[in-house]
Image (tube, rainbow, N blue to C red):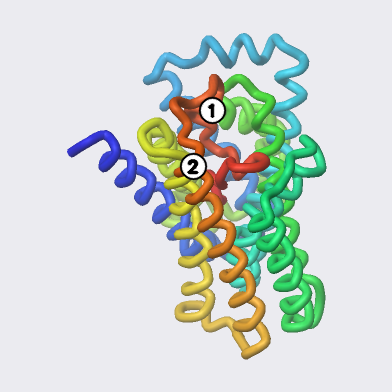
Amino acid sequence: MSETDRGVLFGASAYLMWGLTTLYWPLLEPSAPLEILAHRMVWSLLVVGLLLSLRRGWRPILAALRTPRQLLVLGAAAAVISANWGLFIVAVNSGQTSQAALGYFINPLVSVVLGVLVFSERLRPAQWTAIALGAAAVAVLTYAYGGVPWYSLGMALSFATYGLVKRFTTLDGLQSLTVETLLMLLPALAYVAHLESSGAGTFVSLSPAHTALLIGSGLATAVPLMCFGAANRRIPLSMIGLLQFVVPVMQFLFAWLIFDEPLPLSRWIGFGIVWAALVVFATDMLRNARRNPRPGREKGEEEQGADPGGAGERPAAQPN
């Protein structure tokens, strides 16, 4: 098997696993979303810390922890990815999986807008068309949902902001995730301890299976990330950019076929406009990649394990 084929296999595996986690979080009920989020942070740190030890990759982390600028960047990344994880869990566990799908569909478009606002990037006509279609879709879906789809917008904005912030770190995906979860460890542990001491926690009070599922949230976070890191070193960013759409497609199908969420004609129209925007966006991205082939990755870009589009051409990487 060639390196490219291996990269596609790793990438497809990563995005399929991220899509399947949509079915995982409802299994953790009756745990509240904030409790699930706290456990996800705690057990993710355990898993990524173990993986990092196997790679002997702690030295860059220790250097980053001694650098105030890197700590500030990673602290901001920890805050926005925590918000993204929390919004995703709330959306899925409250019967709003279609809003989660919408959030990740429009995320690349939000990333492009951030590129314009923050880096003054110039957009091609096709990119402007995709953004205009995305805005029209949000307007239609606001009518369809009977209100602004806040979960979708919150997830798209937090995810795009995460990618933007990650452009300023020198760590790879696994290393940066380790620091991010490390920074959130004390608040997460304190919250879990408070819940357990007050009798409101569910970690040990329900069943061994429930306890195992909460612990498993760490694996559900780290394993897809490792597969993505392996893919990102082997295949072009344009290919990863196309693979990312596997996740929201799976989420939309789950909302429709498994969770039986209401999808009236108005919502189908709104999602149809989103898909049209993404067709325009992906076609332009592939055309531009052929015209301007990149001979190699820039330093720091090789394994941005959770860079959700950054700005401009960077694709979404870690959906949830």
Q: Is residue 232 left or right of residue 156?
A: left
Image location (x, y in percent) of residue 38: 64, 44
Residue at 59% across / 42% down in the picture? 313
Q: Residues within 10 Å of mark 2 (few under 14, many from 20)?
A: few
Q: Is residue 6 left or right of residue 278?
A: left
State whether residue 131 is above or below residue 235.
below
Point out the residue furthest to the left here: 1
Residue at 54% across / 32% down in the picture? 304
Amino acid on which the number 1 mark rests in the picture? Glu
Q: Does residue 199 appear in the picture of this structure? A: no
- Of 195 and 17, which appears nearest the observer? 17
Q: Secondary structure at mark 2?
A: helix
Label 1, on which residue?
301
- Of 167 and 285, which appears nearest the observer? 285
State whether residue 127 is above or below residue 117.
below
Rounded to the nearest angstrom, the CA distance separating label 2 from label 1 is: 21 Å
Q: Is residue 281 left or right of residue 110?
A: left
Image location (x, y in percent) of residue 33: 66, 57
Image location (x, y in percent) of residue 104: 60, 58
Image location (x, y in percent) of residue 45: 54, 32
Q: Nearer the viewer, mark 2 or mark 1?
A: 2
Label 2, on which residue?
291
